[in-house]
Amino acid sequence: AGTGKFFVGGNWKCNGTKDSITKLVADLNDAKLENNVDIVVAPPYIYVDQVKQSLTDHIEISAQNCWVGKGGAFTGEISAEQLIDIGCKWVILGHSERRHIIGEDDQFIGKKAAFALSQNLKVIACIGEKLEERETGKTFDVCFQQMKSFADIILNWMDVVIAYEPVWAIGTGKVATPQQAQEVHAAIRDWLKKNVSAEVASSIRIIYGGSVNGSNCSELAKQQDIDGFLVGGASLKGSEFAIIVNSVT
Ligand code: G3P
C-alpha cells in the first residue's frame, strides 16, 4: 500500500434479500475491523436505507450508480441529491458491468462523476481493460482513455478514489497477479502526474478490484501503488470482507 489511507469497498451488486442483508450487516457490526481503514459498502439501492439505519458508522454507504443530473422525470433513476438525502456518502461510477452490459459510455460516465461530485457525493471511479484488450497490448491505452474521460470533466479529485478492475478478473476467480496490478496502478499514477497534477497523483487512492478474496488480498496489499480494494463476491461474507479490510499493511 502507498501513503493514502487504505480503502476497502464492498460492492454487493444485484445480490441479497432483506433477510440476507440483515445477517450481513449483523456480521459486519460484529467483525473486528482495523480503525485506520476507510470502509464502504454498496448495497442495491432498495436496501441502502435499511443498511444505513443498521450498520456501524465506521462503515460508510455507497450507491452502485446514480443519475447523471438533477432529479425529475427520469423513470427508474435515483439522483445524487436523493442519495445524499438518505445518508449515502459515495457512489460507484463506470463499473465495467455498467459499461459493457448496460452500455454506458465514457462521456456519460464522466458527466455522472462530475454531477455527483457537485452534489458532494464522493466517487469510486472504475476503469479497466477487457481480456482481448490485454491480450492485444492495449491495457494502458484503454485505461488512459477511461481516465481521460474522467479528467476532462473532474476538477476536484479530493473526493475521488480510482478503482482499477480488469474485466477479465471480475467474478472469474482469475485475480490479477500483484505484479500485473501494481504495473497498471503505477501507470495510472504516472498518467495522473502528467495529465492532472503531481499532487493528485501522489495523494489519490488507487484500489484494485477483480476476484479479491481473503487469501490473495495480503500479497496485493503489499504493492506500493495498491491503496485498497473494491470487492464483489467476497464482500457478501462478513468474515471474509473483514480479512480483506484487515490486510492493510
Ligand atoms: O466492483 C467489484 C468487482 O467488480 C469485483 O467483483 O466478484 O470479482 O470481487 P469480484
Image (cartoon, helix red, strand yellow):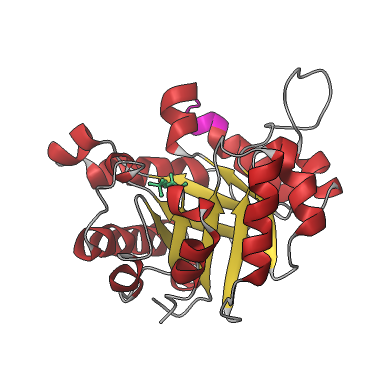
Q: How far across and how far down the image is residue 91, in percent? A: 64, 47
Q: How far across and how far down the image is residue 63, in percent? A: 66, 44
Magenta region, residue range: 104-108
Is any atom of residue 151 visible in this view? no
Residue pictured at 43% horizontal, 36% vertical: 96
Quadrant where the image shows the C terminus: bottom left
Tell me which secondary structure the magenta stretch mostly adopts: helix
Quarter of the view holding residue 81: top right
Quarter of the view holding residue 179: bottom left
Q: Nearer the viewer, residue 99 or 43?
A: 43
58 left or right of 98?
right
Q: Nearer the viewer, residue 101 or 240?
A: 240
189 above or below 76? below
Q: How far across and how far down the image is residue 107, in percent? A: 52, 31
Whether 105 is among the magenta residues is yes
Residue pictured at 41% horizontal, 56% vertical: 195
Residue pictured at 37% horizontal, 59% vertical: 213
Quarter of the view holding residue 158: bottom right
Quadrant where the image shows the N terminus: bottom left
